[in-house]
Image (cartoon, rainbow, N blue to C red):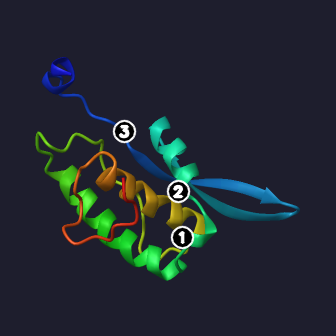
């Protein structure tokens, strides 16, 4: 554990990416949340139950706050913040329920499992 703490490496955490998808003869965009932490993917599958779902606007509102704070920290990293830079999330873009849900849960994972606070008064959906 001391070797990990002494090492100052950046972690690539999450990326919102566009995928061009051809559907029949129409072109459309599809967005995806790419995480680079297998533990999150496992945790997310365990947490992802319809009984816990909120509205898309609920997730969008929280994601705006989390992305803003996350990107601000990436612009001014500290020794307590070693995630790679910004999340490309545009507040006016409609990413749909699934992407907003997964991105929100990634922030919950960082705060509640990794114990790295992002938003001071954020929601708490996960009790360890």
Q: Quadrant of residue 122?
A: bottom left
Residue at 88% in and 62% down: 24
- Which element is circle 3 on? loop
* 96 or 108, nearer to the observer: 108
Assess whether mark 2 and mark 1 are in contact (beta carbons under 8 angstroms).
yes
- Percent of width and height locating residue 36: 46, 38
* 11 or 42, nearer to the observer: 42
CA distance separating discs 3 and 1: 27 Å
Q: Which residue is mark 2?
A: 47
Q: Quadrant of residue 52?
A: bottom right
Apparent side of residue 91 relative to residue 122 in the rendered image (left or right): right
Q: Which mark is residue 52?
A: 1
Q: Quadrant of residue 64?
A: bottom left
Residue at 53% in and 44% down: 41
- Percent of width and height locating residue 109: 38, 52
Assess whether mark 3 and mark 2 are in contact (beta carbons under 8 angstroms).
no
Work out whether mark 3 precedes mark 1 in sequence or the reverse, and give the earlier one.
3
Apparent side of residue 56 relative to residue 72 in the rendered image (left or right): right
CA distance separating discs 2 and 3: 22 Å
Residue at 53% in and 78% down: 56
Assess whether mark 1 and mark 3 are in contact (beta carbons under 8 angstroms).
no
- Percent of width and height locating residue 84: 30, 42
Q: Which residue is mark 3?
A: 12
Q: Quadrant of the N terminus?
A: top left
Tell me if residue 85 comes above or below residue 87 in the rendering: above
Work out whether mark 1 precedes mark 2 in sequence or the reverse, and give the earlier one.
2
Residue furthest out toward the top: 3
């Amino acid at each position: 554990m001391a070797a990990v703490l002494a090492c100052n490496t950046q972690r690539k955490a999450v990326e919102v990416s566009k995928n061009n998808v051809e559907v029949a003869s129409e072109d459309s965009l599809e967005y995806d949340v790419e995480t680079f932490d297998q533990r999150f993917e496992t945790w997310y599958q365990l947490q992802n139950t319809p009984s816990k779902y909120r509205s898309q606007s609920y997730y969008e509102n929280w994601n705006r706050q989390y992305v803003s704070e996350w990107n601000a920290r990436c612009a001014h990293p500290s020794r307590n913040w070693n995630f790679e830079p910004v999340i490309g999330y545009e507040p006016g873009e409609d990413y749909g329920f699934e992407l907003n849900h997964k991105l929100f849960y990634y922030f919950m994972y960082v705060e509640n499992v990794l114990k790295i606070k992002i938003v001071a008064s954020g929601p708490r959906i996960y009790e360890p």
